[in-house]
Every structure is written in C-alpha cells, then in structure tokens.
C-alpha cells in the first residue's frame, strides 16, 4: 500500500493524474458533447470551446510547473535524466500554446463572424497531440508511482 511518505514526488504524481483527468473530461468528452446539446449553434459551441480550451491550457501550464517544481525540489540528477516523457509533453504543450490553439482560435473567430472556411486538419492535429499527452502522462505517472523515496543512508 502506498502512503504519501513512500512516494518521492507526491505533488507531481497528483498533478499528472489530475492533468489526465482534465484532458479526458474536456478534450475527449466536453468538446464533442456540447454540440449535441439542444439549442447550441456552431457559433455558440465555438465560443464556449474557445473559453474552455484557453482555460484548460492555463491549467496545463500550472500543472506542468507543479510537476517540474516537485521533481526539481525533491529530485536527484539520476532521476531527472529519465524525464523524456515529460519533455515530450512539454514540447506538445508548447506547440499547442504557441501554434495550434492560436490557429484554432482564429478559425473559430472567423466562423463566429460568419465566414466560411476551407477544411482544415488542425482539429485532427489537436486530437492527436491530446492522445499523445495522455499516453505520455500516464506512462510518466506510472513511473512516478513506482519511484519510492530512498533514505539518505541508502545512497
């Protein structure tokens, strides 16, 4: 049985699985379901989506700072070398924040204003990145779960 004292990175662990929950609830459920609600037009759904996904993006930045901060404050150099899954998530988050979300936001704004746009693969890229983030976060979280505290006498 795990206790808080036996997990080396409890804040990082909680943040990773909370993050997975946010992605599952918003990206894989809310995003699709809102358009099925009675009275929700495409324009209204896009307006809601812009608000929700911008808020999610801010929450993701808070969570990644908590994860990295907990690892830096409680970590050791040897374990930090195994951060590849988290680095991949960080790169995906950077791509979403500075490229994909602004591009999707612009398209949504144009549709809300009544413009017809050509088909785009941006939503597909976003979904692929979300699946990748959830996968890497789950892998990283499972590694955190199995990474126990080592007493200083064991070094």
Image (tube, grey):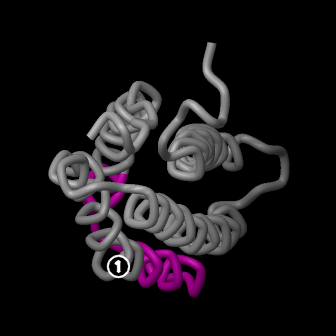
Check the image and report above or below for 150 versus 62: above
* Type of secondary structure dominating the magenta stretch: helix
Q: Which residue is mark 1?
A: 103
Task: Return the residue nearer the eye: 129 or 155.
Answer: 155
Which of 75 and 58 lies nearest the eye of the viewer?
A: 75
Answer left or right for 50 relative to 126. right
Residue drawn at the location 30% of the way across and 73% of the way down: 94
Was residue 1 drawn as part of the magenta stretch in this picture?
no
Q: Which residue is pictured at 26% across the width and 71% down the height?
A: 95
Q: Which residues are magenta?
A: 104-126
Percent x, y for residue 12?
A: 51, 50
Location of residue 144 in the rendering, given as x and y in whole percent from the top left corner: 41, 36
- Residue 149 lies left or right of residue 113; in this view the side is left
Q: Nearer the viewer, residue 18 or 26?
A: 18
Tell me if 64 is positioned left or right of 88 in this view: right
- Residue 120, horizontal then vertical, whole percent: 27, 62
Residue drawn at x 66%, y 27% as measured from the top left: 3
Q: Is residue 21 above or below residue 147?
A: below
Q: Quadrant of the C terminus?
A: top left
Point out the image quarter for the N terminus. top right
Where residue 8 sits: x, y (%)? 48, 42
């Amino acid at each position: 049985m795990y206790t808080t004292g036996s997990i080396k990175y409890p804040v990082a662990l909680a943040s990773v699985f909370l993050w997975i929950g946010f992605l599952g609830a918003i990206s894989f459920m809310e995003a699709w379901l809102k358009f099925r609600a009675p009275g929700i037009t495409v324009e209204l759904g896009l307006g809601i989506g812009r608000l929700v996904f911008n808020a999610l993006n801010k929450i993701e930045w808070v969570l990644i700072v908590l994860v990295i901060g907990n690892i830096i404050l409680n970590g050791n150099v040897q374990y930090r070398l195994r951060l590849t899954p988290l680095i991949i998530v960080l790169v995906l988050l950077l791509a979403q924040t500075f490229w994909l979300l602004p591009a999707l936001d612009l398209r949504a704004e144009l549709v809300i204003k009544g413009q017809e746009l050509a088909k785009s693969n941006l939503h597909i890229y976003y979904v692929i990145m979300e699946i990748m983030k959830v996968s890497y976060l789950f892998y990283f979280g499972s590694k955190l779960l199995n990474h126990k505290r080592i007493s200083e006498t064991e070094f």
